[in-house]
Image (cartoon, helix red, strand yellow):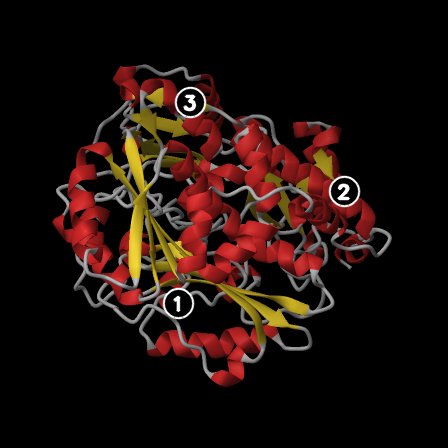
Amino acid sequence: MNKPIAAEVEAVASAAPPASRDELLQRLRGIVGHSHVLTDPIETRRFRKGHRTGEGPVLAVARPGTLWEQWQVLEASVAAGCIVIMQAANTGLTGGSTPDGDDYDRPVVLINTMRITGIQVIGGGAQVVCLPGATLDRLEQTLAPLGREPHSVIGSSCIGASVLGGVCNNSGGALVRRGPAYTELALYAQVGADGALRLVNHLGIALGNTPREILTRLERGLYTDADIENDATRVASDPRYVEDVRAVDADTPARFNADPSRLFEAAGSAGKLCLFAVRLDTFPKEASTVFYIGSNDPDDLTAVRRQLLTALPRLPIAGEYIHRTAYDIGERYGKDTFLLIDRLGTARVPAAFALKSRIDGFFERFGLHGVTDRVLQGLTDLLPRHLPARMRQWRDRYEHHLLVRVSNDTVDATRGILDACFSNSNSGAYFECDAEEGRKAFLHRFAVAGAAIRYRAVHRRDVEDIVALDVALRRNDRAWVEELPPEIESDIVHKLYYGHFFCHVFHQDYIVRKGVDPIAIEHRMWEGLDARRAEYPAEHNVGHLYVAKPALADFYRKLDPTNSFNPGIGQTSRMLGWGSCCDGKPAWPAAYGSTEGADEQAS
């Protein structure tokens, strides 16, 4: 039997490089079908425009329907000297899965993998193998009958985020016992320093010797338990996060994207590899209870955090923070998202977002922006209030809100800790949620995350843009409430603070006043975060918004020495071979014949 952990297949291009742009497009259509190669800017808009930020032109969007088609599209694009951007659900918040601007030195082929949706349960449900289009929502549904859960069941799963996208960005961490998405078991393609395309099988499953055999067998599930290797030296989830988050006196953050100890091949790769599958651990699903805590003194929540992380026999399942302003903006401007999920479930949300994008694209042809946002907001403003009465009472009484979910075997211990924290307090209190209150409290926390985008769309006359930061504070940092300098404060319309409180990861959305440069605001905020020794980004990855720190940039170079995949990520070089500048617009590489039409496509 093959040794799957070490399997590597070098695949030299099977055909001559395309002589022209049109020949490449013809080849791509021959692989995936004419309807799955998009070139019209209207048709490509929802793929080349980020969920929150980032947008740029593409030569084509190719949508393979099988792993073998994905390999063939990749092979043709690499042979043509094109940039390849891998994309799944396009739900990222920092623009990391779309082009950004038009200053690339080669044409861009965007490969969207959402048609390849397989999830394979192995080890009796203890692990899964996920293909490129598998979503967290679908994974959660697949595991539910087995009494298991994926690493993440809050937030991005609701908008159709892909499993592989989470691994690429070390996403997640809302669930305190599980940490960010991480695996050392993956099947991926890589372009080496010699320009050769290779398929690397580190999935731990023996599948064959050629790309076609490996990819076809995997997709069809043509392997047995005997083909699966369980190597104790390769893990399929973060093995040390529990210990890290319990260390409340440590002078460093618990987790952040550029942490070198959590960068491994696919994990944290940010599109610098072409992933075909990942193997991940699953987790037992447990009955739980939610406690809703409010306070006007941040020190109360600090005490709760430290006590629950160190004194409970088992860690809490989740702990989410919401500031009163974020609560209010989320209650009004995230209301339709809340109601959509509450009434129809998470499975309908991706289709709703896709439909919204198509409608927005239609109106933008006529210079009309934000039509759907304004219509939806007008309609939801007419609807009655949707949050439970006790939550609204706590909103009126307290500035700071903390939602704590614990497994039922620790409810009594949790109640005891909270009683001790608030028995003599005039500044805070808590209540124990019933099932409906607990569900809606966490759903509201999710709705807060997109509320700033809706606010921006509805108030374009007053708002320049949003500065969105996700920040990891040191685990021993008691001064977690931010105080902005007056000169920055005056340029902000609203500040939305929310986040994963137990690991001290905060999402901070600043709605910037009209006429103020948001980039200048963000850079000044970076200075303050550096002074606090915070790490950022914490979990949404650098995308095109943040600068990749040296360790992260070096990781990208090692994965992709020719800079063929997703160049410019983390504000690194966009040039072939990591050159330092870009001279002129993107154009068809001269070595491949005519550039006719390329400048028009890129403009």
* Residue sitting at x 67%, y 70%: 583
- Which of the 4 quarters of the picture holds residue 285? top left
Please determine whether, in this image, residue 77 is positioned above or below residue 564: above
The residue beneath circle 1 is 549
Q: Nearer the viewer, residue 158 or 564?
A: 158
Image quadrant where one finds the N terminus = top left
The x, y position of residue 324, in whole percent, is: 46, 60
Q: Residue furthest right?
A: 366
The residue beneath circle 2 is 359
Judged left or right of residue 106, residue 372 is: right
Secondary structure state at the residue bearing disc 2: helix
Image quadrant where one finds the C terminus = bottom right
Within 10 angstroms of label 3, few (less than 14), some, or many (20 or more) residues? some
Rounded to the nearest angstrom, the CA distance separating label 1 from label 3 is: 37 Å
Q: Nearer the viewer, residue 12 or 126?
A: 126
Picture disc at residue 142: 3
Rounded to the nearest angstrom, the CA distance separating label 1 from label 2 is: 38 Å
Q: How many marks?
A: 3
The reply to whether the C-beta atoms of the residues labelled 3 and 2 are less than 8 Å apart is: no
Residue 24 visible in rendering = no
* Residue sitting at x 58%, y 42%: 337
Q: Amino acid at mark 2?
A: Ile
Q: Amino acid at mark 3?
A: Thr
Q: Earlier in the sequence, mark 1 or mark 2?
A: 2
